[in-house]
Amino acid sequence: GGGCELAMHADIIIAGQSAQFGQPEVKLGLMPGAGGTQRLLRAIGKFQTMLLVLSGKFISAAEASQMGLVSEVVEDEQTIPHALKLAKTIAGFSPIAVQQIKEVTNLGQDQSLQGALALERKAFQILFDTKDQKEGVNAFFEKRPAQYTGE
């Protein structure tokens, strides 16, 4: 249960195929207490959340993927290497763009669509005036890897 709650704090969840997810606290006379009800609800919806938190049932990585709880399922021995490769890819992008994407996505999920779209437009406009955006476009046209500086 605590592991599932901890995982839901992440931006991306890479699960090994033998991983299991669940919220078994009800079996101890408790309930999820570190975001397990609310983060799970936002990730997989009411009915799947209720199934897991009220039954204490565990699900496989494949089931978690079908529900939208994990980003990807990979072979167990590839979990860490795959996650590190993905992290390296993301780290190679403009840090300003990555930060704005994370911020707008996280803030927008709890707002109305109109409010979230306004956040997105504002962040997009801010990014358009960065050196990283100009470098990214130039690199694209010059068919070379971009060299982002975070400016």
Image (cartoon, rainbow, N blue to C red):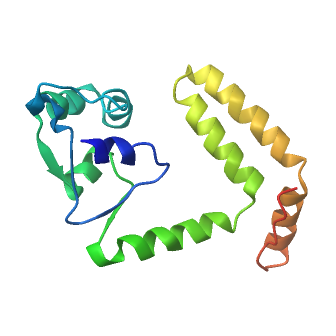
Left or right: residue 83 versus residue 57 is right
Q: Is residue 14 above or below residue 9?
A: below
Residue at point 26%, 30% (across, down): 32
At x 34% / y 52%, what residue is drawn? Answer: 70
Counting the numbered discs, the total is 0
Percent of width and height locating residue 136 = 81, 64
139 sits to left or right of 12: right
In the displayed structure image, the side of residue 85 where residue 71 appears, left or right: left
Quarter of the image for residue 141 reads bottom right
Question: Looking at the rendering, in which quadrant would you find the C terminus?
Answer: bottom right
Between residue 70 and residue 135, name the one nearer to us: 70
Could you tell me residue 139's position as x and y percent? 83, 72
Which of 69 and 57 lies nearest the eye of the viewer? 57
58 lies left or right of 71: left
Residue drawn at point x = 24 percent, y = 31 percent: 49
Residue 88 sits in which quadrant? bottom right
